[in-house]
Image (spheres, rainbow, N blue to C red):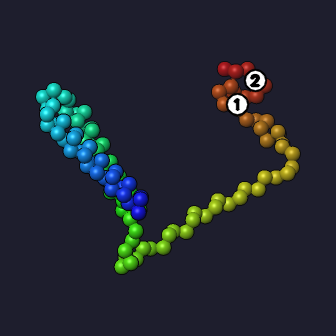
């Protein structure tokens, strides 16, 4: 139950923040830039939405609500075999070094 109390306290703080930002915005209409207050107001709205999503995710489901089963864990990627044979440097004989040109030739 402590988690629910903490979430309620967070919700109250965010609501106080929204009210305070609105009050300051009304008081300082002429002095402050509108873009800055709009940005702060959007951030407080995002905070409010995030807290609501968090509360919804943490809230215990009522017995009448049926939750879908949890999705299965993602499948592990296929293993890539690493051969035990020695490295064959002849595979790179005709390759160019990035930015340097072909091997054993002068750089451009």
Q: Is residue 57 in view from this perspective?
A: no
Q: Residue at x 27, y 38 (%)?
A: 39
Secondary structure beneath dot 2 equals: loop
The percent coordinates of residue 85 (x first, y second) are 86, 49
Residue 72 location, quadrant: bottom right
- Label at residue 41: none
Relative horizontal placement of residue 21, taking residue 49 as reference (left or right): left
The percent coordinates of residue 106 (x first, y second) are 73, 20
In which quadrant of the rendered image does the N terminus lie? bottom left
**Residue closest to the eye, 19 or 25:** 19
Residue at numbered disc 1 = 97
- Label at residue 105: 2
Q: Residue at x 19, y 28 (%)?
A: 32
Q: Residue at x 83, y 43 (%)?
A: 87
**Residue closest to the eye, 89 or 78:** 78
In the rendered view, would you say 45 is above or below 62?
above
In the rendered view, would you say 47 is above or below 74?
above
Distance from disc 1 to disc 2, alpha carbons, whole Å, reads 11 Å
Dot 1 alpha-carbon crowd within 10 angstroms: few under 14, some 14 to 19, many 20 or more: few
Relative horizontal placement of residue 5, taking residue 79 as reference (left or right): left
Secondary structure beneath dot 1 equals: strand
Dot 2 alpha-carbon crowd within 10 angstroms: few under 14, some 14 to 19, many 20 or more: few
């Amino acid at each position: 139950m402590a988690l629910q109390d903490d979430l309620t306290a967070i919700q109250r703080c965010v609501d106080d923040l929204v009210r305070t930002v609105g009050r300051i915005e009304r008081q300082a209409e002429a002095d402050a830039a509108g873009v800055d207050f709009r940005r702060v107001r959007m951030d407080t709205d995002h905070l409010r939405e995030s807290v609501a999503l968090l509360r919804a995710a943490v809230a215990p489901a009522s017995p009448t609500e049926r939750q879908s089963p949890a999705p299965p864990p993602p499948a592990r990627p296929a293993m890539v075999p690493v051969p035990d044979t020695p490295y064959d440097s002849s595979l790179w004989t005709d390759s160019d070094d990035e930015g340097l040109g072909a091997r054993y030739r002068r750089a451009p």
